[in-house]
Amino acid sequence: MCGIVGAISRSPVNQLIYDALLLLQHRGQDAAGIVTMQGTKCFMHKARGMVRDVFRTRNMRGLPGTIGLGQVRYPTAGNAYSEEEAQPFYVNAPFGIVLVHNGNLTNTVALKEELFRIDRRHINTESDTEVLINVLAHEIEVAARDLPLTPDAIFNAVAAVHKRIKGSYAVIALIAGHGLLAFRDPHGIRPLCYGELRTDEGSEYMVASESVAIEGTGRHVRRDVAPGEALFIDVEGRVHTRQCAAATSHHPCMFEYVYLARPDSVLDGISVYQARLNLGETLAQRVISTMPPSEIDVVIPIPESSRPSAMQLAQKLGRPYREGFVKNRYVGRTFIMPGQAVRKKSVRQKLNAIGVEFKGRNVLLVDDSIVRGTTSKEIVQMAREAGARKVYMASAAPPVRYPNVYGIDMPTRDELIAADRSIEQIRQYIGADALIYQDVEAMKRVVRALNPALDGFEASCFDGHYVTGDISAADFAALEAQRTGARDDDEDSAADRSRLALQNADSL
């Protein structure tokens, strides 16, 4: 999961991209990068860290131009600590292409071999984004060989990309001297939308992972990019679109609504906030079937994502809703921190209990999901230390039992507490007096009710069904080995690495 944005403006775009990345910071805190384009020259700055730390005044001054793109990174492939794997990525031929990508390719190994053996392209990192940009560059070169680069040629190239790559991908790319290209995988797994601002000089456009980045920068959301669709905005500000995939379905990632997206975003026609309210309502039914509501003195959310679900659950149960934990906003989201040791250490730095809400009470804690279980165990213990008589735990999402291969940081079964444990065993592990999970089918039903036009959801981590239909046991083994190898690399210091840092130039 990453956050990506691209924009064409009538004025310098660097501040606009920066502001949009701040609005998408929740999607990735490992690294950030911006590229701008002036004429045919591209200017880049990227580094590890939060947006506010990566970009200083001197960096912003070095990003001229009215077209640009940016990314906040949360690594699910490659090395979380590698500077060279921060996005955007750049290739100088054909034309000069810069690209950002949200998602995860599942056939990276085969593509790397194919790129080297057939396309004569060298991949220097473990990042699937570098693979993707080279596939796109090759297909644009083939489509436009000895011909002008027209929108039709670009769309033909995207159609060829769809045939070669597998997995999830939302992509924004700049083609030097030509314009901005955005496209989405044929299943619409990762989100992508675009918006417009009309000015006296003409329209300005933005493409982003979430609607909040568009609305928060004063633009009007036009619509979501459809699964398999490509959108090209030329340097004159003309918008061209085409469906580039032979077969499509619409299965957005359920985890976006459960946890990843901001509640004020609308993804694929569904309000994230309303989706979480609905999840709270159906979770209340599960709680009622498990215990009498009279046994619960107070409902307390675990900040932040679970608040809407907890409020709706409390209302349906007729029990008081209280804020029992104070969150330190200057500590990153625990779920997306690389490394279990860092994640475990940060829980108590991130949350502190308000003792008066716990002392002598039976409390129902509501979380958006339980992935690894270590955070839940720590929070249950915090509630007991604050004086709770009994601690019940409810999850607005079903048990996470299966690896995710489409861009969420849970690719190995041994990381998932529910992979090989019963609910009773999980309850004992986290130390709760009762544990209530959301029902898978109820979750799908109440969220899909907000947009019946969807074909369904990518909910593989809950139900084990992979919508691309091409995931095998060998793929799982390769992905797990890749992730394990990346974690081994993470333990090395940067000084011990000697890779060529070809992607790290501040200007290109």
Image (cartoon, rainbow, N blue to C red):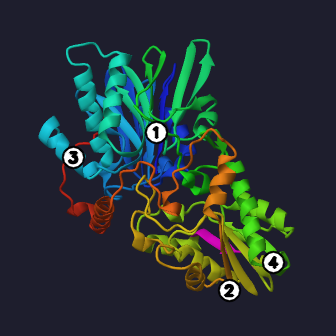
Specify which label sits upstream in the sequence, 4 or 2. Answer: 4
Which tag, 4 or 1, sits closer to the chain's start? 1
Nearer the viewer's eye, disc 3 or disc 1?
A: 3
Which residue is denoted by mark 4 in the rendering? Answer: 296
Residue 353 within the magenta-colored segment of the rendering = yes
Residue 376, image x and y in percent? 59, 75
Crowdedness near tag 3: few (<14), some (14–19) or many (≥20) residues, C-alpha within 10 Å: many
Q: Is residue 408 left or right of residue 317?
A: left
The kind of secondary structure element at disc 2 is helix
Residue 221 appears at what percent x and percent y?
62, 30
Is 260 left, or right, of 443 in this rendering? left
Of callouts 2 and 1, the N-terminal one:
1
Cα separation, mark 4 vs mark 3, equals 55 Å
Q: Amino acid at mark 4?
A: Ile
* Residue under pointer 1: 57
Q: Which residue is mark 3?
A: 112
User: Image height check: is 468 above or below 44?
Assistant: below
Quarter of the view holding residue 366: bottom right
- Residue interval drawn in magenta: 350-355
Alpha carbons under labels 3 and 1: distance apart = 38 Å
